[in-house]
Amino acid sequence: MRGNETFFLLFGLCGFMFGLLTWTYDNLEYKGYPRNSSCTGDCYVQYVKDNGTPAEIEMRKQAAAATDPFSSIKGLWSGCAACHGQKGEGMGVFPKLAGQSAESIIEKLTVYKNRGEVGNMSSTMWAQAGQLSESDINTLGEFIQETMND
Ligand code: HEC
């Protein structure tokens, strides 16, 4: 009789431990990833099938950034866009940049960087261009020519 009780006790304990481990493992499994809590099990398997693992998604993003020749000035451009427009379309006193050649943009930015005059509002651009490196200026010129040729 006593032996039987011990057996059931151990059996129950094992079941409990198994449950605990499974639960812990389930919760550990995807740890470290921003996971949608409603997407586990089959849903997560499907997600990985469609999108790759989180590590693969991250690698794809990095690869895309590496092949974007303008990634270095994208942040910078958002400042320029405040005046010149997102697509360089210009507005009011802010000249249109779209359609200009890289050469022309680079030339004017270099003039501004050296506090020279292009138009009668050149001083507005001095502070802007003063902070740009030569490589920024070249990349901005290419970026405007390549992506805003309208
Ligand atoms: C505060 C508003 C403002 C911001 C921000 C600004 N610009 Fe300008 N930009 C102007 C104004 C005003 C002019 C006209 C200056 C003049 O009369 O020479 C101008 C002129 C220019 C010109 C010469 C255009 C032409 O055809 O004469 C270029 C190129 C240019 N900006 C590029 C940039 C770039 C690149 C940035 C971001 C690094 C930038 N600008 C940020 C206001 C701004």
Image (spheres, grey):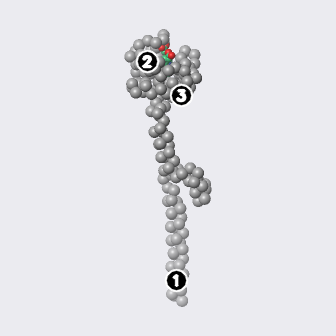
The percent coordinates of residue 139 (x first, y second) are 45, 27
Is residue 55 among what the camera can see? yes
Alpha carbon separation for disc pair 3 and 2? 18 Å
Query: Where is the C terminus found, in terms of image quarters?
Result: top right
Kindly identify which residue carries mark 2.
Answer: 107
The quarter of the picture where residue 138 lies is top left
**Label 3 neighbourhood size at 10 Å, few (<14), some (14-19), many (20+)?**
few
Figure check: 50 above or below 87: below
The percent coordinates of residue 46 (x first, y second) are 60, 55
In this view, the mark in front (3 or 1): 3
Figure check: 140 above or below 17: above
Residue drawn 48% across and 11% down? 119
Figure check: 56 above or below 22: above
**Labels 3 & 2 near each other (Cβ < 8 A):** no
The percent coordinates of residue 81 (x first, y second) are 53, 25
Residue drawn 51% across and 79% down? 10
Q: Amino acid at mark 3?
A: Thr
